Amino acid sequence: MNKVQAQCLPRLISLLFLIHGPSIISVGNTRNTMLIRTAFKFELKPNGRQARQISQFCGCARYVYNRTLSLEKSLYAKDNKHSFRYTEAANRLPKWKSKHPFLKECHSQVLQQSLKDLDRAYTNFFEKRANFPKYKKKFRHDSIRFPQGVELDEVKQKIRLPKLGWVGYRKSQDIIGTIKNVTVIRRGDKWDVSIQTEYEDNPPAPTPSEIGIDVGGQTFCNSVERRVF
């Protein structure tokens, strides 16, 4: 801050005081809270039974995704005004479960999240952010997601997943925030877990030099006075 700017600062603070009242004095200490979402990825360490269950859940999610995509393409071929709707697709699940008992073994959230993935794929296509949805292939990009019902024990390095129970994981860092969803992802013959969390972040408050003092000097002060008075 140069000499002219230093001389200008008291005058500007006085003007702000007149405009906004005494509360402006605390502007340097005011913090705006932002919600931050981030993901923490770890190697999952399921036992044999859990690994088989995870693989089965991925197969169920893939079946629902591919069968729904096939049905949607068929419906569109019959009526080009037809469009994918998540609610309609989710309403088919009870009937499919009654015909295919293996789907009952999978947690309902996993199947619903698979349909949400297809919904997002359609949205990305129509908004020209991606190509038309493709069928999922076995063992390629296998993943399942749990939006709720998850518990975490960082001390014991275990995470409880619906229908799977407590599963070990290799802790490499502490987790910050509230868990919003958990995704289990295949990595070759192993599995990873991605834990998305949300937490509040308080960015640094602006300093007096950030409110315009350094970009106008004496001219800036004079222009402010003219606008105010």
Image: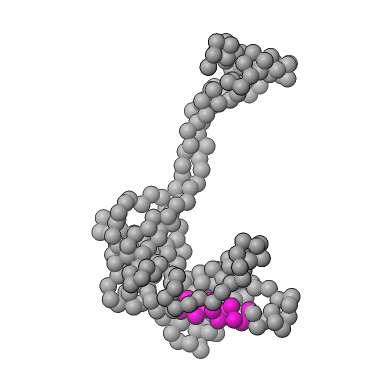
The answer to whether any part of residue 82 appears in the image is: yes
User: Which of 51/164 is in front?
Assistant: 51
Name above or below for residue 198 compared with residue 188.
above
Quarter holding the C terminus? top right
Residue 142, image x, y percentages? 43, 72
Name above or below for residue 179 compared with residue 4.
below
Residue 183, image x, y percentages? 42, 64
Residue drawn at (65%, 73%), measured in percent from left and top? Answer: 84
The answer to whether any part of residue 179 appears in the image is: no
The segment highlighted magenta reads: 60-72
Residue 64, image x, y percentages? 52, 79
Residue drawn at (47%, 38%), measured in percent from left and top? Answer: 202
Q: Is residue 39 left or right of residue 47?
A: right
Quarter-wise, where is residue 76 in the image? bottom right
Quarter-wise, where is residue 53 in the image? bottom left
Magenta run includes residue 45: no
